[in-house]
Amino acid sequence: MESLTSLGSAVGALLTERRQTLAVAESSAGGLINATLVSVPGASSYYLGGCVIYTATGRETLLGITPGDMTGMRSASEPFAQLLARRVREKLGTTWGLAETGASGPRGNRYGDPAGHACIAVSGPVEAVVTLETGSDVREANMWLFARRAIELLESCMRKAKS
């Protein structure tokens, strides 16, 4: 298995080189995305903070997302992932916001999504949102895949933004 540091090093180098900042809100990856980013030496120059949003209480208390903000959307969806990315970016005043929400397993979520389902979003100079379906119900493996895909999406958006 790849180390946290090796997974986060390319994004860390880009953020450092460009003097840009990042904030993260994740859910079913359980903190692995945040850990990947802070494991890189020098992360304090670009990583301003992050949170694991696992409940409605966490969503409202940490990011100020109210039931009214959720009108017409559900958790573990692309619109919700985009809302998380935008809100964490806004709250921490960063260049980039990265968010993940889904169902790591071994069962799916209450919305009917299977284990291995995640929506990942980036907010910043370039925005993107994707849905990942791993086809697996192995919780830890899915968490690692969600984290990897989130870092890859962020790097892709950063490269599209050029600088």
Image (tube, rainbow, N blue to C red):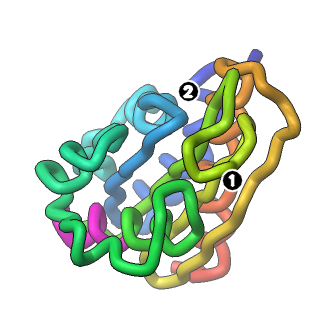
What residue appears at the point 51 percent right and 74 percent down from the top-left corner? 79
Mark 2 residue type? Thr
Residue 48 at what x, y percent from top left? 23, 50
* 91 falls in the magenta region: yes
What residue appears at the point 53 percent right and 34 percent down from the top-left corner? 29
Q: Name the residue under label 2.
A: 5
Q: Is 70 or 29 nearer to us in this picture?
A: 70
Residue 57 at what x, y percent from top left? 19, 45
Q: Residues within 10 Å of mark 2 (few under 14, many from 20)?
A: some
Q: Taking 45 as reference, is 41 left or right?
A: right
Q: How crowded is mark 1: few (under 14 residues within 10 Å), some or many (20 or more)?
A: some
Can you say whether 159 is above or below 142 in the image?
below
Dot 1: element:
helix
Residue 85 at what x, y percent from top left? 40, 65
Q: Give the range drawn in magenta.
A: 86-92
Q: Name the residue under label 1.
A: 152
Q: Taking 28 as reference, is 130 left or right?
A: right
Mark 1 residue type? Glu
What residue appears at the point 54 percent right and 82 percent down from the top-left corner? 126
